[in-house]
Image: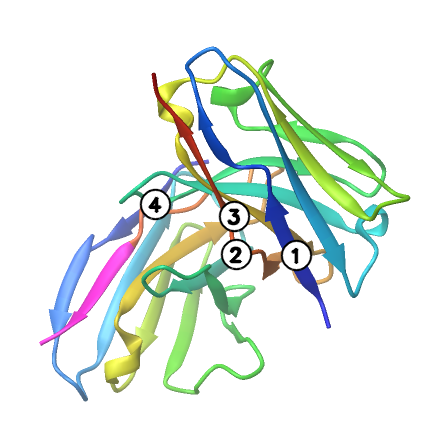
Amino acid sequence: EVQLVESGGGLVQPGGSLRLSCAASGFTVSTNYMNWVRQAPGRGLEWVSLIYSSGTTYYTDSVKGRFTISRDNSKNTLYLQMNSLRAEDTAVYYCVRYDTSDYYFDFWGQGTLVTVSS
Amino acid sequence: IQMTQSPSSLSASVGDRVTITCRASQSVSYYLNWYQQRSGKAPKVLIFGASSLQSGVPSRFSGSGSGTHFTLTISSLQPEDSATYYCQESDGTLLTFGGGTKVEIK
């Protein structure tokens, strides 16, 4: 059974850093395309970042240079390092697998809340 | 690519036919997916590739369209369909969502 479990969210001050983790089971992170998608309180879904099986990464413009997506193959875990956090980064962050046969987000974690506030 | 959904919200009765529209700022071919998000839950895919029904999703949900204009139709609205619906393009490397359509039951 595929499972994605996020952790690492919490309250952080503006300008601070946080690292989110996503522990996967039931499949191998390194052979899949993995994403982070966020949702600000009361707002819609926003794609944040993607890492291909090749290791190539992509980011939405608003987080480029501040966020870094990575993975640890030995732990089958996806990460999102978030630096220089802003109030507008406050959101629930979902770890999401991407189906590369039919090109859609097929499995989602339960999400972890990041709150950026002083 | 920008994705624009309409309406942003709607209220309909059980049994009604409901249609949600999604427009892309440039052609995304058939690379368009629809998700349902119930309150407090993670989204789940309903339709992928513009018109393919995900396994386990009720047949009252259907999708159509190509290029820049897509629709999600619920043929007979049920109480459990109260949720927010999002379109999402998968044509590019930046995987954009529409703004969402909140569906309420009268």
Q: Nearer the viewer, mark 1 or mark 4?
A: 1
Location of residue B71 (image quadrant): bottom left
Give the labeled residue for mark 1.
A4
Give the labeled residue for mark 2.
A110
Q: CA distance from mark 2 to mark 3?
A: 29 Å
Name the amino acid, label 1: Leu
Q: Is residue B40 above or below residue B68?
A: below
- Label 2: chain? A
Give the mark nearest the N terminus, 4 or 2. Answer: 4
Residue A82 left/right relative to B99: right
Give the labeled residue for mark 3.
B28
Quarter of the rendering occupied by the C terminus of chain A: top left
How many residues crowd mark 1 within 10 Å: few (<14), some (14–19), many (20+)? many
Give the labeled residue for mark 4.
A44
Location of residue B2 (image quadrant): top left
Viewer-nearest residue: A82 or B82:
A82
Q: Give the magenta range.
A: B101-106
Name the amino acid, label 4: Gly
**Residue A71 pos. (x, y %):** 78, 37
Provide the secondary structure element on which disc 1 rests.
strand
Viewer-nearest residue: A14 or A58:
A14
Q: CA distance from mark 3 to mark 4?
A: 21 Å
Residue A45 left/right relative to B105: right
Name the amino acid, label 3: Val
Residue B77 is at least partly visible in this image: no
Q: Nearer the viewer, mark 4 or mark 2?
A: 2
Q: Is residue B60 above or below residue B3?
A: below
Q: CA distance from mark 1 to mark 4?
A: 21 Å
- Label 1: chain? A
Q: CA distance from mark 4 to mark 2?
A: 16 Å
